[in-house]
Image: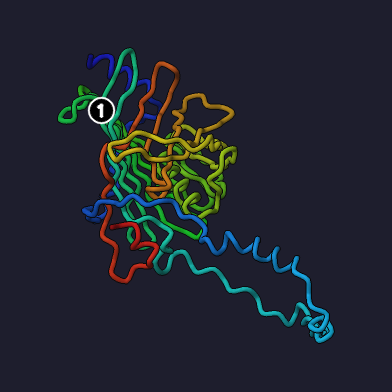
């Protein structure tokens, strides 16, 4: 059994022994159970407004009232372009707190089932942590018994929050097998270039994400409406994976209802599409509007015979909202 799981670890791409220690976990306490929330709906008054306008437009105007209407006054001349003041500059991303659209720091725990030359079981955990404009995404996948897993893979993304979303600065990955030394790799990202584990450099494309940050970036895009949650819509997302840079795309397949320990949860399925997937693991993700579009299920596939499927196992835990938090942010907790 251990030998088979050793081969599974070998089959997972991206294991180079760089000996680089990952950064320490942010000191954030996660104790508050996250409340399920119904997705927002437009106010009833807004939904009825178009019909009310149509009724007013169709109503005849009395003759007396029509004769009393004065002709409109001419509009004032528009100022020349040179007289217009420039639009306000965007705030410096390095200053102040991020907006209330970012979820509070959250921990999600998953049960794991999968297949590699037979059934495999385990568990997984995702931690989304933020302090000011800094963030960490910590993803841990363990295959085997919880006290002594055969394989453990830890992925860490660290960077900053900007008006354009997540901006990763480094990605660390560590793979441990029960009978072998840990193997580590690192991807470094700055505004101009990406350095891969083999030392190769590539220019940094706008909006690039890494293996761990991609899920929270998708959460933010749907939560803020920058990308619509609509079947058939596609989201372009360049990914700096350990081997190289990929032009990734997520297609929104549709809204499904998943049976979870929290009860039935509606979730949007996002399926990855990439032209050249050689040497990559592809993750289909289900994002629930009732959990701020955080991932309820993640299915990671190498091929038809090698895959793991993660399903939310318990209510997520969050940090307590600060007393002066924006109402949107305080609404995350009961």
- Residue 304 appears left or right of 32: right
Which residue is labeled 1 in the image?
Answer: 122
Could you say where residue 119 lies in the image, as x and y percent from the top left? 30, 17
- Can I make out residue 18 in this image? no
| Quarter of the image where the N terminus is located | top left
Could you say where residue 89 lies in the image, as x and y percent from the top left? 57, 71
Residue depicted at x 44% and y 48%: 219
In front: 84, or 53? 53
Location of residue 231 by image quarter = top right
Location of residue 301 by image quarter = top left
In front: 125, or 213? 125
In front: 275, or 232? 232
- Residue 178 appears left or right of 82: left
- Can I make out residue 93 in this image? yes
| Quarter of the image where the C terminus is located | bottom left
In front: 302, or 245? 302
Location of residue 249 by image quarter = top right
């Amino acid at each position: 059994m251990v030998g088979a799981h050793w081969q599974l670890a070998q089959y997972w791409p991206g294991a180079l022994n760089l000996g680089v220690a990952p950064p320490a976990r942010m000191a954030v306490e996660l104790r508050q159970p996250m409340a399920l929330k119904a997705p927002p709906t437009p106010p009833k008054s807004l939904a009825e407004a178009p019909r009310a306008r149509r009724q007013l437009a169709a109503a005849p105007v009395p003759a007396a009232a029509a004769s009393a209407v004065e002709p409109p006054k001419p509009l004032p001349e528009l100022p020349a372009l040179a007289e217009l003041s420039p639009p306000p500059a965007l705030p410096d991303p390095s200053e102040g707190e991020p907006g209330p659209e970012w979820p509070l720091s959250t921990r999600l725990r998953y049960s794991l089932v999968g297949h590699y030359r037979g059934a495999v079981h385990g568990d997984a955990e995702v931690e989304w942590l933020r302090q000011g404009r800094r963030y960490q995404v910590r993803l841990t996948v363990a295959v085997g018994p919880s006290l002594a897993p055969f394989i453990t893979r830890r992925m860490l993304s660290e960077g900053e929050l900007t008006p354009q979303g997540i901006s990763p600065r480094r990605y660390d990955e560590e793979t441990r097998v029960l009978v072998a030394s840990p193997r580590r790799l690192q991807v470094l990202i700055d505004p101009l270039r990406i350095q891969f584990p083999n030392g190769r450099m590539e220019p940094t494309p706008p909006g690039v994400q890494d293996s761990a940050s991609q899920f929270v970036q998708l959460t933010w895009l749907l939560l803020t409406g920058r990308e619509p949650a609509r079947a058939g819509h596609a989201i372009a997302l360049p990914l700096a994976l350990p081997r190289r840079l990929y032009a990734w795309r997520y297609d929104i397949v549709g809204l499904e209802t998943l049976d979870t320990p929290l009860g039935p949860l509606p979730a949007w399925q996002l399926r990855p599409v990439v032209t050249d997937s050689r040497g990559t693991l592809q993750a289909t993700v289900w994002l629930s509007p009732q959990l701020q579009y955080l991932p309820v299920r993640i299915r990671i596939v190498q091929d038809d015979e090698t895959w793991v499927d993660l399903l939310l196992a318990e209510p997520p835990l969050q940090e307590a909202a600060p007393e002066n938090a924006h109402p949107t942010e305080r609404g995350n907790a009961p």
